[in-house]
Every structure is written in structure tokens, then in C-alpha cells.
């Protein structure tokens, strides 16, 4: 059976979201259109932004899924990313703390999508 290879995030403004995620993850899109932008994050695996959920992609809509960035190395690596991202003006939901799976924090994009940084499994 095939594995999932598209992770789609609903945004209101594809151009603004592209700038945010390009800066945050230090990656460039591999496909750009006015309403859909894709980043190849591994061979054959896309992280994409889509305005098709525009009415629901508002910060007040509760989110139960997260974009995850798993980081190798010591817990200090996660704290360093937090410091770097805060300097970029991100909205912090959870400050760095130790959870059952290790050091972690959560931010959101301007549409309220959750982004968690945690250690590699």
C-alpha cells in the first residue's frame, strides 16, 4: 500500500503563507500557483499550502492536527530554534517545555495552523 505523500495546509493567503513557511523552514517552493503552493520536503513528499479552505482557515477555528518538525540532537537544539523563530515574530502557543516525548514547543502561522517542534523519535 502506498504511503501518504501530500500534507496539505489550509491558508487564506497563499503568497503570505509561502513567505512565512519559506522563511520559517528555510525552504523554497517547488510549485507556485495563486491558490496552491508546494514544497518538496523529501523525494516524492509534498508539504503544500492551499486556499481551498479559506473560510475555515482562521485563527479562531480550533486545530487538532499539527505540522511537525522533528529535530535531532540535544534539547538545546529545540530551544535554539524557538529563540530563532521568536525573533521572526511567530505567535507562540506553548513555550519550550519537557513533555513525555522530550523537549517541545508549539507556534501558529497567521491562519492558526499549529506547528510543533520536538525531538526525533
Image (cartoon, rainbow, N blue to C red):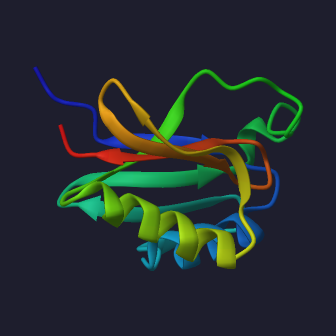
Q: Nearer the viewer, residue 1 or 41?
A: 41
Q: Nearer the viewer, residue 41 or 30?
A: 41
Q: Position of residue 92 (x, y in %)?
A: 71, 51
Question: Viewed as shown, does residue 33 lie left or right of 74?
Answer: right
Residue 3 versus residue 95 in the image, above or below: above
Q: Position of residue 4 (x, y in %)?
A: 27, 32
In the image, what residue occupies the spot 27% across and 46% down? 119
Residue 12 versus residue 19 in the image, above or below: above
Question: Viewed as shown, does residue 85 lie left or right of 77?
Answer: right
In the image, what residue occupies the spot 79% across and 55% down? 110
Query: In which quadrant is the N terminus drawn?
Result: top left
Residue 91 versus residue 21 in the image, above or below: above
Residue 40 versus residue 75 in the image, above or below: below
Query: In which quadrant is the C terminus drawn?
Result: top left
Q: Position of residue 66 (x, y in %)?
A: 52, 35
Q: How many marks?
A: 0
In the image, what residue occupies the spot 53% across and 63% down? 82
Q: Nearer the viewer, residue 78 or 90?
A: 78
Quarter of the image for residue 103 reads top left
In the image, what residue occupies the spot 50% across and 53% down? 48
Quarter of the image for residue 89 reads bottom right
Question: Viewed as shown, does residue 95 lie left or right of 42?
Answer: right
Q: Nearer the viewer, residue 103 or 35?
A: 103
Q: Position of residue 84 (x, y in %)?
A: 55, 76
Amino acid at each position: 500500500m502506498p504511503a501518504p505523500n501530500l500534507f496539505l495546509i489550509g491558508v487564506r493567503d497563499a503568497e503570505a503563507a509561502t513567505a512565512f513557511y519559506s522563511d520559517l523552514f528555510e525552504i523554497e517552493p517547488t510549485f507556485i500557483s495563486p491558490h496552491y503552493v508546494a514544497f518538496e520536503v523529501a523525494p516524492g513528499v509534498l508539504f503544500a499550502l492551499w486556499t481551498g479552505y479559506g473560510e475555515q482557515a482562521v485563527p479562531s477555528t480550533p486545530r487538532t492536527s499539527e505540522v511537525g518538525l522533528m529535530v535531532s540532537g540535544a534539547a538545546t537544539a529545540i530551544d535554539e530554534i524557538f529563540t530563532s523563530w521568536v525573533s521572526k515574530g511567530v505567535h507562540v502557543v506553548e513555550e519550550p517545555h519537557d513533555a513525555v516525548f522530550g523537549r517541545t514547543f508549539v507556534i501558529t502561522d497567521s491562519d492558526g495552523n499549529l506547528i510543533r517542534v520536538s525531538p526525533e523519535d
